Image (cartoon, rainbow, N blue to C red):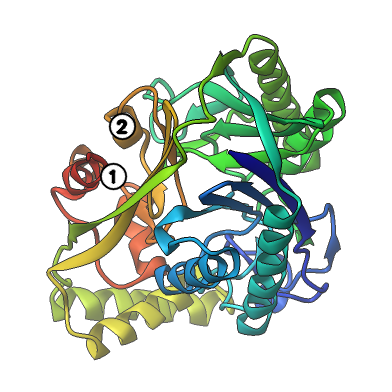
Amino acid sequence: MKAGLALVDITPPVGTRLSGFAGRPVPGFVSTGVRDTLRATVLWLEGALIVALDVIGLTPRDDRALRQRLAKAVGIAPEEVLIACSHTHSGPATMTIRATGDKEVGWTRELFRRVEAAAREAKATAEPLTEALVGSVNCDAAINRRKPDGPRDARVRTLQIHTQRGLLVTLVHFACHPVALGNQNTLLSADWVASLREHAEPTLGCPTLFLQGCCGDINPRFGTSRGADEAERVGKEVAEAALQAAQQSKAIALTTPTPTATHRRAHLPLNPYPDEATLVAIESEAREKLATLGRSDIDQAFLEWIAAVRRKPARNFAVATVSRLTLGPLTLIGLPGEIFTEIGQALDSESWPVGFANGNLGYLYPDSALDEGGYEVALAYKLYGEQQAGLGTATALIRATRT
């Protein structure tokens, strides 16, 4: 097997709309500068392509389009391409999420062009893979944001790929929302993932490729108010764990067989729309708040959501793509959105669940969350789309991960 790596700057021009937070202190969600370079990290493993992007996510349609484009560029099947987004809340608006900025269509096209060029470079520069090592160390940088004592995956896991020239790349897998900078930040940034790279890569002597885990209900364990210091601290903690995991890593047989990939469809149940009386009440309250406050991104989003509900027929289910990319004894499972921890914990403990792969459908959660409510369940679906994920969502996802 041959392995190749390419890095490409995907930082958009200043003024590009940001995505991820309501209530930014600038009109139109526009970026006012660059805090750190956004990056696409592209790894070619003969027969498969892994692409990590410093963006909030892609729509399922854009994910399919980019996968097909990359597959054609390097001569593999679309299923053999895994696109994973970090979900930084300080990156460009590569998809529309109500209350947080409309999609930057032109920039998304440019992003695709740059990633395709990087994919070609990764394959063209590939060399024989000589060794692969896997490590894992627990890290206390994150917390379950819905239940402080609730479940989370504390593991920082690493996969180091060596070629004839030495250490090529270190994959780092961890579950934690990149929201440390907070909604007052207006600078383009990879959030704490940038700090992870800054602290880990000089010691490792190679680039890192970050894979986000099941972080739907997982935030940084904030020590103070959100901001640059917190992004720095969280990234440093994850980097220290990654370095320790790499030091303790053990070799795995990644050279044979070649990677295998499968995609399966999951039918995610959707709850019906609220009745008209409920919509009228939400609409009236939102208009009153807007009239009083002048600006309320969430209330404006509610009005846009209601208009869409009245325009679009309700569906019984949403179709999601769940992928498996098997690299010898290691399997990466691509999941399409902000996945709750419990779903990841229901998978094979040796598999790496990768969130924000195969598109970003929003929050996907276990049945218990519907009774508990909260932002992720009761509000966020109005920003991502029109209908709330219903009972059986987790079961459908988990079933689709199995061969």
Residue 118, given in percent of the width and then of the height, sits at: 72, 61
Who comes first in sequence, dot 2 or dot 1?
2
Helix, strand or loop under label 2? helix
Camera-side residue: 299 or 376? 376
The residue that label 2 is drawn on is 342
Q: Quadrant of residue 110?
A: bottom right
Numbered mark located on residue 375 in the image: none
Question: As drawn, is 174 to the left or to the right of 321?
Answer: right
Residue 260, given in percent of the width and then of the height, sits at: 39, 44
Q: Give the residue displayed 34% in from the left and 63% down from the top.
A: 381
Q: Give the residue displayed 83% in from the left and 72% down from the top.
A: 14
Residue 329, given in percent of the width and then of the height, sits at: 42, 25
Instruction: Indicate the amino acid at tag 2.
Output: Glu
The residue that label 1 is drawn on is 365
Camera-side residue: 202 or 343? 202
Q: Residue furthest top?
A: 248
- Quarter in which the C terminus is drawn: top left
Residue 373, given in percent of the width and then of the height, sits at: 27, 46
Instruction: Indicate the amino acid at tag 1.
Output: Tyr
Q: Is residue 203 above or below residue 51?
A: above
- How far apart marks 2 and 1 lie (CA) works out to 8 Å
Q: Are marks 2 and 1 in contact (CB under 8 Å)?
A: yes
Mark 2 surroundings: few (<14), some (14-19) or many (≥20) residues within 10 A: some
Question: As drawn, is 304 to the left or to the right of 7?
Answer: left
